[in-house]
Amino acid sequence: MFDEILTKIDDVVWGIPTIALILVTGLVLTISARGVQFTKLGRAFKSIFKKNDGEGELSGFSALCTALSATIGTGNIVGVATAIVGGGPGALFWMWFAAILGTATKYSECMLSIKYREVKEDGHILGGPFYTIEKGMGKSWKWLAVLFAVFGVLAGLLGIGTMTQINGITDAVNNAFDPDGMNIAFTLFGTGYTWATVISGIVVTLCTALVVIGGLKRISKVAEKVVPAMAIIYVFLGLSVLIMNATKIPGAFVLIFKSAFGVHAATAGIAGYIIKMITESMQKGIARGIFSNEAGLGSAPIAAAPVQTNEPVEQALVNMTGTVIDTLIVCTMTGLAIVVAFYGDIIAPGGIVFEQVDGAVKLVSNWNMGVKGAPLTALAFNKVLGGDGHSVQFLLMLCLAFFAFTTILGWDYYSEKCLEYLTKGNMKYVLIYRVLYVLFVAIGPYFTVNAVFTIADITNGLMAIPNCISLLVLSGVVAKETKSYFERFPKLG
């Protein structure tokens, strides 16, 4: 019943209007920023390690790692798997489509955040969509800024920041150490929880508490070390899967594109299912894509605001590479690995499968319906890489655990800054919030995967709406700032 209620709310929040708003925002900003994601991508990657000398608290690389720490997480491993199960392989296409437009969105929102940031009396810097709305659109729009900040706090506490991440970690640990559920610690509402789940949940909760108390600089230091190392390991695993199945990749792409537009459903003679198939594919792909790369969500601008720079465009170029790294590289590897591993299955929403038999498309059912989230990704990697099965699972577990842990830290920072804006810098409320944040991390393992991801989708959508409205209104500012910067600095200095 609870899952059904959440699903209905999710369908409303992530209905056609929200999807259209995000895509239109990306398209408008692509035009306003002169296609910066295509024409300046090489320069953006070169700028990552450029030394900053402006006013601020973090280097550009630290800010990018902080942002990536919050994006490269369960969305890349668990989210992609749930998107494919819920929306078919076509969900990957819509993830790519949204990410290409979203790169311009990420560039624009980060640039505006730095432009409208505020330096407080004690020297620390606060910025994000709340100040972009208040300063850029005017005081009469402060209600929209407050709305964004409220949704940002809820997203951190109830959605993407806590329960989804810890749930992903404990699920992966349990899958690696006790997949058959032989060692039950206790039963809650008819569901048994293993000692692997309980112990890993306690360890992550304690580690979260220790780092969160240290604030931004401790979070960025952890992110600088953990994110690159884990990304390299995961990319190595993903590349290994794809290289060993290089001949199947073209077919996998064909399957993804056909699934995105319901071609197999039409071929099977059930044309009435096409619209539902495409809609669910778009919804799951775009929602999970936003969950993963956070373009348009308004979170990355909060990390970009304290950067040591006097040129908002300069750091915005660096931050837009986060969407490319997160979705177009890491998520793609996960998605292709799953599709390649189960290449014979043409997956449709709801577990319905269209299997190709002797050139015809046959309707079958219940494809891997018992396998969701991290276990599905592990199953795909194991099927391709072979071996004893345990080694790959263990490596995936490590990657997911560290990715998700840094996401927990990054989203604590985001939601704290939203709360700081709402309370006008009253640190007493921020300290209380930190305790609540750790508490929600602690209880996260005991919610279902579907429930926590649906809650995250809802809060993400609620954040995206006011943020995208402000980006559309201020698209002229984006165009002006972009033109001015590249006229003054035609080449990377």
Image (cartoon, helix red, strand yellow):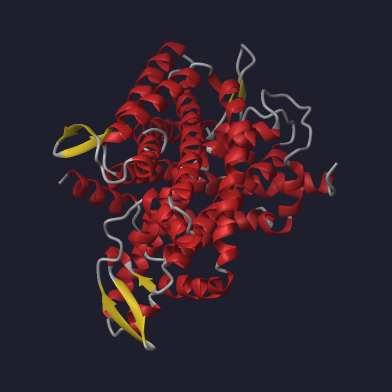
Residue 323 percent coordinates (x, y): 58, 49
Q: Is residue 140 left or right of residue 227?
A: left
Residue 73 vertical position relative to residue 385 in the rendered view, above or below: above
Question: Which residue occupies the foreground of this view, 12 or 240?
Answer: 240
Residue 137 at least partly seen: no
Q: Is residue 323 left or right of residue 260?
A: right
Residue at the bottom extreme of this rendering: 359
Question: Which residue occupies the foreground of this view, 184 or 374?
Answer: 184
Question: Which residue occupies the foreground of this view, 418 or 146?
Answer: 418
Residue at the front extreme of this rendering: 388
Residue 482 vertical position relative to residue 20 in the rendered view, above or below: above
- Quarter holding residue 303: top right
Residue 212 percent coordinates (x, y): 48, 21
Residue 193 vertical position relative to residue 395 in the rendered view, above or below: above
Q: Is residue 491 left or right of residue 468?
A: right
- Quarter holding residue 239: bottom right
**Which residue is drawn at the image coordinates 39% and 43% (left, top)?**
176
Total number of numbered labels? Answer: 0
**Which residue is drawn at the image coordinates 69% and 24% (left, top)?**
56
Question: Which residue occupies the foreground of this view, 423 or 460?
Answer: 460
Residue 301 at least partly seen: yes
Quadrant containing the C terminus in the rendered view:
top right
**Which residue is drawn at the image coordinates 53% and 34% (left, top)?**
138
Residue 226 percent coordinates (x, y): 58, 34
Q: Is residue 419 left or right of residue 452?
A: right
Residue 386 percent coordinates (x, y): 48, 59
